[in-house]
Image: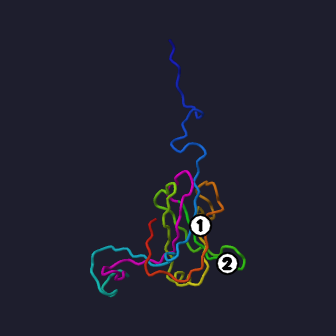
Amino acid sequence: TQKRREYNSYRLNSQGIYGAGTVPDITGRFEVGSICGKTYTKHDDLKCTKDAECENNRVCHEGVCADMRYVISGKLCNRGTKPVSTNLPASFFFYDKENDTRGDRICTSYTKTPVGIGKCDKVGCEVTEDVFKSLVGKDVLMITNEDEHGHRSTDECNYNNNNDKITINACAEKIEIVN
């Protein structure tokens, strides 16, 4: 008897565990109290009581020398039915109330871990001290799934829920960024 030849047919391929028709839905929101602030990264166990005891432009934070960064952040969520891989962008802009448009881009952050179904991660990016000081009293816009060139990186089911805007009243002394 002649054996039937097997071949790969895309029509017979399985759709995987999520199946056809599943799609992510990326949303972005600011969280009051952690929109802008300073983050600290401890690099050594050098104990300190004041900044002058630290080297390499480090500051004394919680009794240990650390690098300090100024950041702006928001919460990026996946409300869809399919996970999203790493490198999902979130861009931050100054917001022009008079013209109801985004202004100059502040920065763009990318997720470092996948965002699962129904999961959220805090994303943020570093800004200069001048930009950090200028944020208070300004309106800021966050757009998820948009990179620094205005391009989307992921297809999703609703592109109209990716934005959030807020007037920044104050920046926090310390905030945590996950991604």
| Residue 123: percent from left, percent from top | 50, 67
Q: Nearer the viewer, residue 61 or 21?
A: 21
- Alpha-carbon span between mark 2 and mark 1: 18 Å
**Mark 2, other Cα within 10 Å: few <14 / some 14–19 / many ≥20:** some
Residue type beneath disc 1? Glu
Residue under pointer 2 = 96
Q: Nearer the viewer, residue 77 or 136?
A: 77
Magenta part of the chain:
58-87
Front disc: 2 or 1 = 2
Residue under pointer 1 = 148
| Residue found at the far top of this picture | 1
Q: How many numbered discs?
A: 2
Residue at point 63%, 54% (across, down): 157
- Relative to 1, residue 88 above or below: below
**Corner quadrant of residue 97:** bottom right
| Residue 153: percent from left, percent from top | 58, 57
Residue type beneath disc 2? Asp
